[in-house]
Amino acid sequence: MDTSRKQYKVNVRVWITEADGHFLGLGRVRLLENIRKTGSITGAAKEMKMSYRQAWQMVEDMNKRSATPMVEKILGGKGGGGAKITAAGEHAIGEYYRIETLINQFADELNKEVKL
Amino acid sequence: MDTSRKQYKVNVRVWITEADGHFLGLGRVRLLENIRKTGSITGAAKEMKMSYRQAWQMVEDMNKRSATPMVEKILGGKGGGGAKITAAGEHAIGEYYRIETLINQFADELNKEVKL
């Protein structure tokens, strides 16, 4: 096989499922980070150009699938009130990035020996 | 963190890029396998419910991005004639599955220590 000057790269997308459904991928991690940054689900939804309803449903689903809620809603106020990331949420963000980094490092190692 | 009875799983999707663009993912591997099975791009497209044009473009792009063409078109005949996988194509299918398997095995190992 002529491997010539072509540059190939192994790419990986990582997500975590819980039982039968999606739990945590890059989209939800970004949502959590935007809740942390803006202090509300409304603010995070705006940053990500998604509807409040969509963001809220993602948060509800994550909270349901996590052993401990990941986002704590602060009741009241216009636009659904504030929200903050719990210790379980911060832990999950860290775990996602740790796993993603390890898998990407593994894929980078494979790049060295891929022959196409 | 209460890890309770929740079952979490790390999932991975793998694809290979060449220079600036998509080269080989599960969709294209399935297309190659269907060309092998049916002996033509037309037949493979039908199996996958895609248009001949779409399948043909995927084959053209793969052939362009591979050092050696992966699909050899046999000219003539109704519906664009036949096609077969070259040795380079068979090799690429094998490499894709080999890499995908290794990364999935690595992800499975991580599953054992994921705490969410």
Image (spheres, coloured by chain):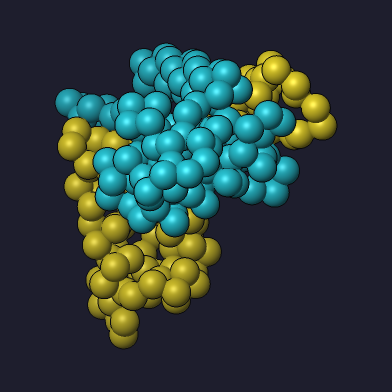
Chain colours: A cyan, B yellow
**Of residues B93 and A95, which is closer to you in this image?**
A95
| In this rendering, position of residue B58 left or right of residue A59 | left
Residue A54 x %, y % = 44, 54
Give left or right: position of A80 versus B56: right
Q: What is the number of callouts on the image?
A: 0
Q: Is residue A114 above or below residue A40?
A: above
Task: Name the spot of residue B35 as percent of width and height, x first.
Answer: 44, 63
- Residue A25 in view, yes or no: no
The residue lying at 70 percent from left, 49 percent from top is A20
Name the image quarter holding the N terminus of chain A. top left
Residue at point 24% right, 62% down? B57
Q: Nearer the viewer, residue A115 or B82?
A: A115
- Horizontal and vertical percent position of residue B69: 27, 47
Q: Is residue A72 visible?
A: yes
Location of residue B55 by image quarter: bottom left
Which quarter shows the C terminus of chain A? top left
Relative to A83, residue B54 above or below: below
Residue projecting furthest to the bottom: B78
- Outermost residue on the front side: it is A77
Above or below, B38 against A59 in this view is: below
Task: Tell which of A62 and B47 is nearer to you.
Answer: A62
Image position of A67 (left or right of A115): right
Q: Residue at x 17, y 26 (%)?
A: A5
Q: As displayed, is residue A17 above or below residue B60? A: above
